[in-house]
Image: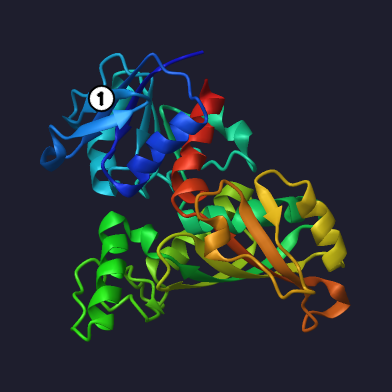
Amino acid sequence: MACNLAIAGVTGAVGQEFLKILEQRDFLFDSVKMLASSRSVGKKIEFKGKQYIVEELTNKSFDRIDIVLSSAGAAQSKEFTPAAVEAGAVVVDNTSAFRMDPEVPLVVPEINPQKIHDHKGIIANPNCSTIIAIVPVWPLHKANPVKRMIISTYQSASGAGMKAMRELKEQAREILDEKEPTCEAFPYQIAFNVFSHNSALDADGYNLEEVKMIKETRKIFDCPDIAITCTCIRVPVLRAHCESINLEFTDPITPDQVRDLLNTAPGVSLIDDRQNNRFPMPIDATGQDDVFVGRIRQDESIPDNRGINLWVAGDQLRKGAALNAVQIAEKLL
């Protein structure tokens, strides 16, 4: 079944990744409309051998559109999504605008695909760090419920968009040329540096990225009581996030059991070569669909073999964003 498709925020990093993935997966559509803010109007985009002109995203953009893949920013989503739904479209939204709305399903197709058809016109795509963490945790949680998760993220510049990716490259050149680095996309130097995720802090000192991961995981797992704590950090990597994940299970579990479960888990690949000290890296995950898992170890600090440590790497622009949304759209069709 084909559809009339619109891509909102098409000129951004995720929007451009939408186009790559739609072509690679041979997504069926009758027509496609390229939408962005007024400053991008008139730009030409090549897609599947045809040239398209970018149109301005407005409330009138959705006539005869069936599915909207949206990554235009939370404020724009809140402004324009109601018009798309009223016009009869289903919006797969890649922003934070609707994720915690109890009326909006928050979906990772490997975990809760049954929620897709519960929509009332909007389906939310989770935060990139949440997706990369929970795709490998879910098959373990199904086999042996997770009581507690401790997550530390090492997040790439791509999570802040194209401008941030360009800034990392430009700062590296500036610093190597012994010049003062230009900071615009990030509040601090990202090249050759590490800093706490640049989102707002709440009254308890947690940044917004950490809060998202906690709340979104509970919603997707339909497990409001699972204990989760996070520390989210920016690192000077162009693309693909890494995460250290510590899990406390209800019952004993061994690293070999974890490997067996993950070997057959959808969307997961293992790189767990202890002999050669070879484990997932951003360069492994970049451009790939799967989340890569390694460094699978028993946590000896948790009694009765109920603790496991994992290290994961996932492409923030693909499975962390655009791919997840396209997978949802495929299941809608």
Where 291 sits versus 190, above or below?
A: above
Residue at image coords 33%, 76%: 191
Residue at image coords 47%, 19%: 28
Residue at image coords 12%, 38%: 38
Residue 33 drawn at (x, y percent):
28, 24
Of the residues shown, which amino acid type is indicated by label 1? Gln
Of 30 and 197, nearer the camera is 30
Task: Find numbered disc 1 in the image and state the secondary structure of the residue it sits on.
Answer: strand
Reading the image, the residue beneath label 1 is: 51
* Residue 39 occupies quadrant: top left
Residue 332 drawn at (x, y percent):
52, 24
Give the left or right position of residue 163, taking residue 157 as reference.
Answer: left
Of 79 and 159, nearer the camera is 159
Residue lying farthest front? 177
Of 31 and 135, nearer the camera is 31
Residue 16 drawn at (x, y percent):
34, 41
Residue at image coords 71%, 75%: 277
Residue 157 drawn at (x, y percent):
37, 64
Q: Residues within 10 Å of mark 1 (few under 14, many from 20)?
A: few
Of 305 and 292, nearer the camera is 292
Where 21 sits versus 258, above or below?
A: above
* Residue 300 occupies quadrant: bottom right
Give the left or right position of residue 128, taking residue 9 as reference.
Answer: right
